[in-house]
């Protein structure tokens, strides 16, 4: 199933004079024997000899036995499953090809024969749908892995059908089965006991999910044990032990981590991994940096059974949990600083292992350690869109911290983090409850700065924009934003208040954005900078400056894409698509794709941020009117399968409108001496309060000066003021040197 192209291509290759030896390689259960049998059936050769070597244990006399069966004319010899007698098979094939010039050999095995002239044919895994599985049911059914699942599921339950209710679960199961046909077949046998959703839950939690001992199959394919034991027999004792211990990793693993976990040198680790990859027990995941390896699910289940039988499973999982607890704590200080993009990308392939570590810590009664790890990961969950899951772990963390009086400050931080996830998911009531508890805990700790930040967020959630309570909250947040101890929580509060005020008090919104931007810049928080740019774009759009709004949205998307942001990106994609639609109405297909991509990302993450700017309903109605039905549906389907990175890439590929540039000399001439002095201090990173102290002015006077500078330079933020000053200084320095 799903091998039509492979069968046709292989049949053609077998007919070429240059393809005298073709070896089909791949892991157990990928379908090497089935593909070879199909090629035999379609082959134009009239003389075909077949030998099943799966059960062979001794290759003595193999050459002579085969030679006696071969004719002198054109013929095809199929050697199926040679890995246990690989050396003898290699000698036999080499000899036979030399003595029978019209002979073709098709061999199947888990590794090459390494005979001169051999052409390797790695049998691919079945195609699986890409996450987040937002395709329509009909589109998912077109993937060979899903088609196989449905076919085998109907053998268990004749009424089984792929529906909107189970399609995403089926797609994820097929992906977790690596697209390995045998694994998919074994998984469907579990449907005798479990629903599709229950089966997926078992897979996510690391439980056994493959059926076994199906007597209708060949002995070597009846169960996970049967298919994997054959490969294990080819390993030496040390390789078996190392592979078995690696089974506690649920995701991909790099060589450095394996070396630490195995207590081996880098060279020995690399040598061992090469052997395991060669035996098709691990597969290498392509990355730009260090190679990462993933264990096939069939192999993992077999190894976990071995660990449990030997009594080593608990110890291995505890060591795994300890490793990822240390990693989570190391990541905490990096997820909002200058290394934010690198750490977000580093944690992405490790997420399932981090979750497994949290579960193990909790199972071992180490609730406080699990709470520390959950708090450390909250920003990763926020950025990458694991909102519901993150909120659940933070709820447990908050309970653990509240139970220990020495961790009250951590309890406050956890409630604030939990509230931020809830706000991003659109859960206003839960967010308000969490911010209220956070404010109380901060007050008890004497932390008035972060208490005011939490109260500012609470005011937005509970009051109508423009009310006295919101205005007072904004003033207090602006005040605490100048405090040296202010962190990202204060910046987030200022940003939320700015979003709330942008429609009825643009002046306050700008002040709050300046405060938020200054803190995000100080902490070098890329996501925060992107959020601030998006809100500035909304302000520019509200005053009719679409060109500036599009520029700011482009910059925001660029920052979001650099860190793999998933929760706020849909809103920015929506706004950017609408701006493109107004400027480039002939780009209807692109706009439709971007809007569909934004919708799919929302569905996958559950992100529905409060105070999201604008709606795409009008643009969608217009697109439906202008595009034909098939055109609109095609672009929508294409957009829904785009990843967040791909969607952002398509949006960024369209350059923002060219802006009218004003020479630096004329722009600087617009600034008074005092305004240039203020701009210079802004470029040095000083806050409004610090500038006021330096120049002996009132803080409100400085705020007005900063506004006038930004207006005269026609720039949207303090960051752009700093960039303008730096550019001017470099130009002047260059001119002095030339003079």
Image (spheres, grey):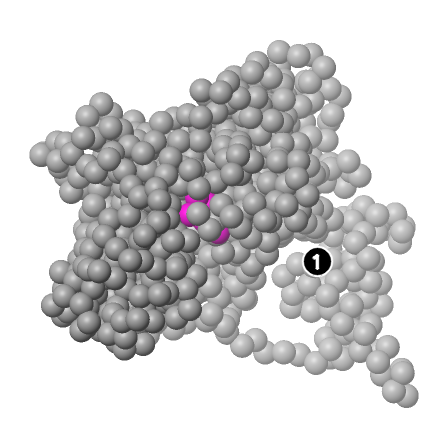
Q: Which is more toward the observer, 697 or 553?
A: 553
Q: Quadrant of residue 414?
A: top right
Would you place residue 357 above or below residue 266 in this image?
Answer: above
Residue shown at 55%/53% (left/top)? 291
Q: Which is more toward the observer, 40 or 385?
A: 40
Q: Quadrant of residue 197?
A: top left
Q: Secondary structure at mark 1?
A: helix
Q: Is residue 565 left or right of residue 44?
A: right
Residue 82 position, x and y percent, is 33, 50
Q: Is residue 377 left or right of residue 583?
A: right
Which residue is denoted by mark 1 in the rendering? Answer: 718
Q: Is residue 724 left or right of residue 527?
A: right
Residue shown at 31%/66% (left/top)? 96
Residue shown at 69%/30% (left/top)? 450
Residue 432 position, x and y percent, is 51, 26
Residue shown at 81%/74% (left/top)? 730
Q: The C terminus appears in which quarter of the rendering?
A: bottom right
Residue 708 position, x and y percent, is 71, 62
Q: Inspect this view and state whether residue 98 appears.
A: yes
Most extreme residue toward the bottom is 739
Q: Inspect this view and state whether residue 678 appears.
A: no
> Magenta segment, principal secondary structure?
strand
What segment carries the magenta color? 280-284
Would residue 714 be counted in the magenta stretch? no
Q: Quadrant of residue 77?
A: bottom left
Would you place residue 475 above or below residue 724 in this image?
Answer: above
């Amino acid at each position: 199933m799903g091998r039509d192209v492979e069968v046709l291509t292989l049949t053609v290759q077998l007919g070429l004079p240059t393809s005298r030896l073709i070896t089909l390689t791949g892991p157990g259960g990928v379908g090497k024997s089935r593909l070879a049998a199909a090629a035999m059936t379609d082959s134009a050769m009239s003389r075909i000899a077949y030998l099943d070597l799966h059960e062979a244990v001794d290759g003595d006399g193999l050459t002579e036995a085969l030679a006696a069966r071969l004719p002198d004319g054109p013929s095809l010899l199929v050697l199926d499953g040679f890995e246990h007698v690989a050396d003898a098979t290699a000698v036999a094939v080499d000899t036979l090809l030399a003595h029978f010039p019209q002979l073709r050999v098709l061999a199947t095995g888990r590794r090459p024969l390494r005979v001169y002239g051999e052409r390797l044919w790695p049998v691919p895994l079945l195609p699986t749908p890409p996450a987040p599985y937002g395709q329509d049911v009909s589109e998912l059914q077109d993937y060979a892995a899903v088609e196989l699942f449905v076919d085998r599921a109907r053998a268990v339950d004749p009424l089984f059908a792929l529906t909107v209710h189970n399609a995403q679960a089926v797609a994820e199961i097929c992906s977790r089965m690596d697209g390995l046909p045998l694994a998919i077949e074994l998984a469907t046998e579990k449907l005798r006991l479990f629903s599709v959703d229950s089966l997926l839950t078992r897979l996510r939690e690391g439980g056994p999910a493959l059926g076994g001992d199906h007597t209708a199959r060949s002995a070597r394919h009846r169960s996970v044990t049967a298919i994997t034991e054959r490969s294990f027999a080819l390993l030496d004792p040390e390789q078996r032990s190392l592979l078995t211990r690696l089974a506690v990793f649920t995701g991909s693993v790099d060589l450095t981590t394996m070396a630490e976990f195995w207590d081996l040198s880098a060279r020995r680790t690399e040598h061992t991994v090469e052997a395991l990859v060669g035996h098709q027990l691990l597969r290498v995941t392509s990355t730009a940096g260090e190679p990462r390896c993933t264990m096939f699910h069939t192999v993992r289940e077999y190894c976990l059974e071995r660990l449990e039988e030997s009594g080593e499973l608990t110890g291995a999982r505890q060591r795994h949990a300890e490793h990822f607890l240390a990693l989570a704590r190391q990541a905490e200080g990096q997820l909002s600083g200058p290394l934010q993009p690198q750490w977000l990308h580093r944690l992405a392939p490790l997420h399932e292992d981090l979750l497994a570590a949290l579960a193990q810590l909790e199972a071992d009664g180490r609730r406080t350690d699990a709470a520390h790890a959950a708090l450390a990961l909250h920003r990763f969950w926020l950025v990458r869109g694991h909102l519901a899951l993150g909120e659940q772990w933070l709820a447990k963390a908050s309970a653990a911290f509240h139970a220990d009086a020495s961790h009250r400050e951590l309890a406050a931080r956890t409630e604030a983090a939990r509230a931020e996830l809830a706000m991003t998911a659109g859960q206003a009531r839960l967010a308000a409850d969490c911010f209220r508890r956070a404010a109380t805990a901060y007050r008890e700790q004497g932390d008035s700065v972060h208490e005011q930040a939490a109260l500012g967020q609470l005011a937005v959630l509970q009051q109508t924009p423009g009310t006295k309570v919101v205005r007072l909250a904004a003033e207090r947040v602006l005040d605490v934003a100048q405090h040296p101890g202010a962190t990202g929580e204060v910046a987030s509060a200022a940003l939320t208040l700015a979003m709330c005020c942008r429609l009825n008090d643009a002046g306050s919104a700008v002040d709050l954005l300046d405060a938020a931007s200054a803190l995000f810049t100080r902490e070098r928080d890329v996501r925060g900078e992107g959020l601030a740019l998006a809100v500035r774009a909304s302000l520019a759009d509200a005053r009719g400056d679409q060109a500036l709004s599009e520029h700011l949205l482009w910059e925001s998307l660029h920052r979001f894409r650099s860190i793999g942001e998933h929760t706020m990106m849909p809103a920015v994609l929506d706004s950017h698509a609408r701006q493109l639609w107004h400027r480039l109405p002939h780009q209807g297909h692109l706009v439709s794709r971007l809007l569909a991509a934004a919708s799919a990302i929302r569905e996958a993450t559950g992100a529905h941020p409060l105070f999201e700017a604008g709606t795409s309903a009008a643009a969608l109605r217009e697109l439906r009117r202008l595009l034909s039905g098939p055109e609109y549906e095609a672009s929508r389907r294409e957009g829904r399968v785009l990843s967040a990175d791909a969607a952002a890439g398509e949006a960024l590929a369209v350059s923002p409108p060219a802006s009218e540039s004003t020479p630096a000399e004329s722009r600087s001439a617009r600034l008074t001496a005092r305004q240039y002095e203020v701009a210079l201090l802004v470029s040095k990173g000083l806050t409004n309060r610090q500038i006021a102290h330096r120049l002996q002015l009132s803080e409100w006077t400085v705020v007005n000066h900063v506004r006038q500078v930004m207006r005269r330079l026609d720039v949207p933020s303090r960051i752009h003021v700093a960039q303008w000053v730096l550019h001017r200084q470099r130009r002047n320095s260059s001119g002095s040197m030339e003079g």
